[in-house]
Image (cartoon, rainbow, N blue to C red):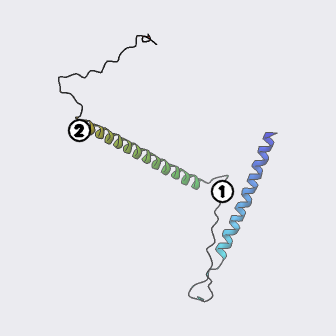
């Protein structure tokens, strides 16, 4: 049952794509055949109209020709090259940021002399009183 639905939806989609492509062809033909008024001939008759938004519909062709495959391959290669360049640039920027952080920490450490001991002294941590596990008297 599910296979029948998929097949019918695929045929429906193919039919809709064919209809849309026919409409696009008709619109493009009407735009190409429509004469454009020359401004030198009749400037008084030209009316100022608001620009109409262009409608673009992207369709994926069912069968691609070798020329479009080649252009798709070229587009894919260009995209891959751009992607690799962006990755490399990000790595370089991260390495620079890490070096700057290391330099900033080293500079902060070298400037921080407060609380440091002379060379021969060892810093000892203060001893913490250990609890004996008993309660004080009178509790």
The answer to which of 103 and 37 lies nearer the viewer is 103
Question: Which residue is depicted at the point 72% across and 56% down?
Answer: 17
Q: Quadrant of residue 108?
A: top left
Q: Estimate the x, y position of residue 131 in percent, counting from the top left.
A: 40, 13
Question: Which residue is depicted at the point 47% across and 47% down?
Answer: 83
From the viewer's perspective, is 35 left or right of 79?
A: right
Alpha-carbon neighbours of circle 1 within 10 Å: few (<14), some, or many (≥20)? few
Question: Which residue is depicted at the point 77% across and 50% down?
Answer: 11
Q: Quadrant of residue 120?
A: top left
Residue placed under numbered mark 2 in the picture: 111
Q: Is residue 59 above or below residue 101?
A: below
* Marker count (numbered): 2
The answer to which of 38 and 133 lies nearer the viewer is 133
Residue placed under numbered mark 1 in the picture: 59
Q: Estimate the x, y position of residue 42 in percent, counting from the top left.
A: 60, 89
The answer to which of 130 and 20 lies nearer the viewer is 130
Q: Secondary structure at mark 2?
A: helix
Q: Where does the N terminus fall, quadrant-wise?
A: top right
Q: Estimate the x, y position of residue 67 in percent, counting from the top left.
A: 57, 55
Question: Which residue is depicted at the point 46% across and 50% down?
Answer: 82
Q: Secondary structure at mark 1?
A: loop
Mark toward the start of the polypeptide (1 vs 2)? 1
């Amino acid at each position: 049952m599910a296979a029948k639905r998929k097949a019918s939806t695929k045929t429906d989609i193919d039919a809709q794509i064919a209809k849309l492509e026919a409409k696009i062809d008709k619109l493009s033909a009407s735009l190409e055949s429509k004469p454009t008024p020359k401004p030198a001939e009749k400037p008084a008759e030209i009316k100022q109209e608001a620009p109409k938004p262009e409608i673009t519909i992207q369709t994926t062709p069912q069968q691609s020709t070798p020329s479009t495959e080649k252009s798709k391959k070229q587009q894919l290669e260009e995209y891959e090259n751009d992607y690799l360049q962006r990755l490399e640039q990000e790595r370089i920027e991260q390495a620079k940021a890490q070096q700057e952080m290391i330099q900033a920490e080293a500079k902060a450490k070298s400037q921080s002399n407060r609380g440091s001991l002379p060379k021969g002294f060892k810093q000892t941590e203060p001893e913490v009183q250990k609890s004996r596990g008993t309660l004080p008297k009178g509790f």
